[in-house]
C-alpha cells in the first residue's frame, strides 16, 4: 500500500513521473537528468522510476521507485504526466512496457534505437520478437535483413544504424523532445499529428563550477607537462568515433607541429571496438593514452588541461554529444564532422570537417591550423563558450521542459484507430444469415462480385466507429452484400472501382481525400489479368496506406477456367503470398472453396456466371512498409519500389 506521506505529497504540486537512469548509474542520460532534476523539483512533484536492477540513487534526490514498485502503485499516478528519457542503451529497456500502457512525453536522446530493441529481445534469446520488430518497421525486407544476419552468424559493424527501430516508441509518445532540428524533422515526418519539440541539450552547471580551473592548474592536477599540447577525444570509445581517422591525421603531423599528446577520454568497450589495436598499429602508441571511465572531477580536470577536442561521429545515431557541449562551454576549441546533429552547431562555435572523400586531408589541415595557431584556438574557444552559455543555458532548457509538459498534459491526445474487429464470420454464421435473409440475400449475392470472400472467408463483422473499404468492378453491389451479410453500416463503407482507387486522387463520397490509416477492413475483388505490374504495385501500396495496423485485407482474384495460368501476372495465385508479405501483410490465410459449402446449401438456387475460377486470401496488416519486387527488370530501374506508407502532415513545434 502506498504510504500516507507519498499520498499527501502528490497533491501539493503538479505530479510528474520521470522514467530514466540516474546516478550512480554510469550513463550520460543519467547525468543529464540529474542536472535538470533540481529545476524540475522546483516546478513539479517528481517521482523518478528506475529499473529494478539499477543502482539506487542517494536519498537527497527525488522520490524514487523501482519499476516493480511503480507497477504496484501505478493507480496513484494515473493523472500524472509521464516523461520518458530514452536512449539507445540497455539501461532503458524497462521503459518500453510502461510506455505502451502509460504514453507520455518522450525525450529522444538517440534517433536510432536498434541496439535498445536488440537488448530487450536478443539478450533474452527472443529472436522472433526482434524479427517481428524489424518487420513491423520495415516490412518483409526488414525481417529478411535480420534473418540473414542470424543465418550468417554476424553483422557488419554499422549495420545497426541502418534500422533505427524507433517506431514503437514514437507511436506511443504524446509529444517528443529532440536535441537537434535534424531529428525533429525526421520524427515529425514519422509520427504525423504528434507534437515534436526542439530543445537544445543543456550546458552542465558543473561547467560554471569548474570555470575557474586554469590550464596551468589542471596540468598540475593531471600530471600532464605544461609544454605539451593536448588533443582529446571525448565520450564512449566506439567505432563510430572514427579514432583511426584522428590517429592518422595526428601521425601525419607529428614532428611538423609543436609536441602533443593524444588522449582518448571515455569508457572503453573492447568487446565492441578494439581501440588498443588501432593505437598499436599507429605511430602514436607512445603518446596516446586511453583513460577509460572518468568521474566528473577527473573529467573536468582533463577538459581544462585540453587544448583541442576532436569529436568525430560517423555514422550518427541521431544523438547530440553532452560531453561536447561541456567542452564548448569550458571554452575548448573543437573539431567536428559537418554531419548529423553535431553539424548543426554554428561555425563560430566549432571547426567543421566535411564528411567526404577528402575527410582525412581536411581533418589533418584543421588539426594543423589549431595546433600551430594559439590565436585561432582562443578565438574559436571564446565563440564556443559564448554560444553554449547562451543557447544551451540550463535554466532556459528547464523552462522549455516545464512548458512542454504542461502543454502536453492539457491537450487531449489525438485519437488513433483501434485494433481491427476480431469478431469474424464463420461458415455456420454465414449460412444462417443467408437463410434469414432469404431472397434478399440471394439477390445481393448475385449482384455482388466474387464468390469465396462472402461464402468462405473469415470476414470481420462490422463494429461501430470503424470503416470498411471495397474495391470491385461492382462497388455498390459488393458493398451492399458486405453490409447486409456481415453487419457493416452502409454509411461506413467506401466503395471504389479499381480505376477510381488507382487514380491520381482518391476521394470518398463527400469528395474528401482518403486519410491514411482510415479502414479496419478492405474487401478487394479483381480479375487476375486486369492489372499491369505498375497498377499491382500501386494497388497494394495504397491498400497498406488505407488500412491501419492490425486491419484485415480480403483479396479475391478471378479468371476464366479456360485461361492459361500466367506466373508473370502481377497478382498471380502462385506469388500472392510473397506479394502480400512484401506489401506489409502477414498471417496469410488461403480460403478453401469447400469452406463455402454451407453457404451454397443455404442458397441452392443462386444464379452465377459459369466458367470462372476464384482464389481468395485473407491477411492482416503488420507493417507500414510496403515494397514491390519487379518481375520485369529494366536497366537503370530499381529491383524494388516502395517504402513507408503511413506518413501524413508533420506537426513540428518551435
Image: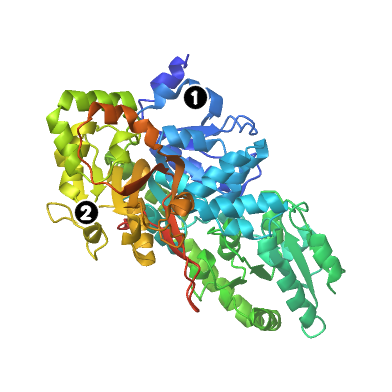
Percent across and percent down for residue 580 are 43, 50
Mark 1 Cα within 10 Å, few/some/many (few <14, many 20+)?
few
Q: Which numbered mark, 1 or 2, is in the foreground of this view? A: 2
Residue ID at (66%, 69%) = 310
Q: CA distance from mark 1 to mark 2?
A: 53 Å
Q: Is residue 487 visible?
A: no
Residue toward you, 245 or 39: 245
- Give the secondary structure at mark 2: loop
**Which coloring applies here?**
rainbow
Left or right, residue 436 beside residue 535: left
Which quadrant would the C terminus be assigned to in this image?
bottom left
Residue toward you, 566 or 255: 566
Left or right, residue 440 beside residue 21: left
Residue toward you, 168 or 125: 125
Percent across and percent down for residue 90 are 62, 42
Residue bearing the label numbered 2: 473
* Mark before the other along the chain sequence, 1 or 2: 1
Q: Quadrant of residue 290?
A: bottom right
Residue bearing the label numbered 1: 71
Identify whether 640 is placed above or below 202.
below
Q: Quadrant of residue 465?
A: top left
Amino acid at each position: 500500500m502506498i504510504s500516507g506521506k507519498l499520498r499527501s505529497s502528490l497533491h501539493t504540486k503538479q505530479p510528474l513521473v520521470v522514467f530514466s537512469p540516474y546516478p550512480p548509474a554510469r550513463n550520460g542520460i543519467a547525468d543529464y537528468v540529474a542536472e535538470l532534476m533540481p529545476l524540475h523539483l522546483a516546478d513539479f512533484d517528481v517521482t523518478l522510476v528506475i529499473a529494478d536492477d539499477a543502482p539506487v540513487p542517494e536519498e537527497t534526490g527525488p522520490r524514487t521507485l523501482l519499476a516493480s514498485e511503480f507497477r504496484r502503485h501505478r493507480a496513484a499516478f494515473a493523472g500524472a504526466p509521464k516523461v520518458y528519457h530514452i536512449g539507445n542503451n540497455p539501461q532503458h529497456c524497462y521503459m518500453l512496457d510502461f510506455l505502451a500502457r502509460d504514453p507520455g512525453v518522450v525525450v529522444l536522446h538517440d534517433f536510432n534505437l536498434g541496439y535498445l530493441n536488440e537488448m530487450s529481445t536478443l539478450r533474452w534469446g527472443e529472436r522472433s520478437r526482434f524479427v517481428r520488430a524489424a518487420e513491423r518497421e520495415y516490412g518483409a525486407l526488414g525481417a529478411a535483413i535480420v534473418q540473414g544476419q542470424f543465418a550468417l552468424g554476424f553483422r557488419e559493424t554499422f549495420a545497426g544504424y541502418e534500422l533505427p527501430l524507433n517506431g514503437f516508441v514514437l507511436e506511443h509518445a504524446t509529444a517528443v523532445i529532440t536535441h537537434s532540428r535534424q531529428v525533429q524533422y525526421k520524427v515529425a515526418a514519422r509520427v504525423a499529428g504528434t507534437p515534436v519539440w526542439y530543445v537544445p541539450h543543456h550546458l552542465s552547471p558543473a561547467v560554471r563550477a569548474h570555470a575557474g580551473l586554469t590550464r596551468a592548474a589542471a596540468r598540475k592536477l593531471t600530471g600532464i607537462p605544461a609544454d605539451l599540447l593536448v588533443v582529446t577525444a571525448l565520450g564512449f570509445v566506439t567505432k563510430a568515433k572514427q579514432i583511426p581517422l584522428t590517429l592518422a591525421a595526428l601521425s601525419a603531423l607529428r614532428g611538423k607541429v609543436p609536441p602533443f599528446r593524444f588522449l582518448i577520454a571515455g569508457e572503453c568497450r573492447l568487446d565492441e571496438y578494439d581501440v588498443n589495436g588501432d593505437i598499436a598499429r599507429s605511430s602514436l602508441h607512445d603518446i596516446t593514452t586511453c583513460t577509460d571511465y572518468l568521474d566528473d572531477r577527473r573529467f573536468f580536470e582533463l577538459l581544462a588541461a585540453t587544448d583541442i577536442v576532436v569529436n568525430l561521429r560517423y555514422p550518427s545515431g541521431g544523438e547530440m554529444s553532452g560531453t561536447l557541449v561541456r567542452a564548448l562551454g569550458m571554452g575548448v576549441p573543437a573539431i567536428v564532422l559537418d554531419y548529423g546533429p553535431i553539424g548543426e552547431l554554428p561555425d563560430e562555435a566549432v571547426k567543421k570537417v566535411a564528411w567526404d572523400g577528402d575527410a582525412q586531408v581536411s581533418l589533418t589541415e584543421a588539426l594543423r591550423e589549431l595546433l600551430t595557431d594559439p590565436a585561432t584556438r582562443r578565438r574559436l574557444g571564446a565563440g564556443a563558450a559564448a554560444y553554449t552559455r547562451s543557447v544551451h543555458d540550463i535554466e532556459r532548457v528547464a523552462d522549455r521542459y516545464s512548458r512542454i509538459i504542461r502543454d502536453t498534459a492539457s491537450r487531449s491526445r489525438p485519437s488513433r484507430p483501434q485494433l481491427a474487429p476480431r469478431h469474424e464470420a464463420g461458415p455456420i454464421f454465414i449460412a444462417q444469415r443467408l437463410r434469414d435473409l432469404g431472397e434478399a440475400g440471394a439477390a445481393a449475392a448475385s449482384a455482388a462480385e466474387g464468390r469465396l470472400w462472402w461464402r468462405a472467408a473469415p470476414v470481420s463483422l462490422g463494429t461501430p466507429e470503424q470503416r470498411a473499404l471495397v474495391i470491385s468492378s461492382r462497388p455498390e453491389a459488393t458493398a451492399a452484400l458486405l453490409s447486409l451479410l456481415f453487419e457493416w453500416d452502409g454509411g461506413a463503407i467506401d466503395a471504389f472501382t479499381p480505376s477510381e482507387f488507382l487514380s491520381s486522387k482518391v476521394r470518398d463520397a463527400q469528395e474528401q481525400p482518403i486519410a491514411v490509416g482510415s479502414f479496419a477492413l478492405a474487401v478487394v475483388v479483381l480479375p487476375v489479368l486486369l492489372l499491369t505490374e505498375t497498377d499491382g504495385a500501386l494497388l497494394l501500396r495504397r491498400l497498406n496506406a488505407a488500412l491501419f495496423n492490425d486491419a484485415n485485407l480480403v483479396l479475391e482474384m478471378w479468371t476464366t477456367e479456360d485461361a492459361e495460368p500466367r506466373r508473370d501476372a502481377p497478382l498471380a495465385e502462385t506469388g500472392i503470398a510473397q506479394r502480400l508479405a512484401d506489401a506489409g501483410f502477414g498471417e496469410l490465410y488461403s480460403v478453401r472453396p469447400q469452406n463455402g459449402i454451407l453457404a451454397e446449401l443455404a442458397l441452392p438456387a443462386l444464379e452465377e456466371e459459369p466458367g470462372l475460377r476464384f482464389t481468395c486470401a485473407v491477411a492482416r496488416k503488420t507493417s507500414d512498409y510496403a515494397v514491390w519486387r519487379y518481375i520485369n527488370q529494366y536497366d537503370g530501374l530499381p529491383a524494388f519500389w516502395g517504402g513507408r506508407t503511413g506518413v501524413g502532415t508533420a506537426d513540428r513545434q518551435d
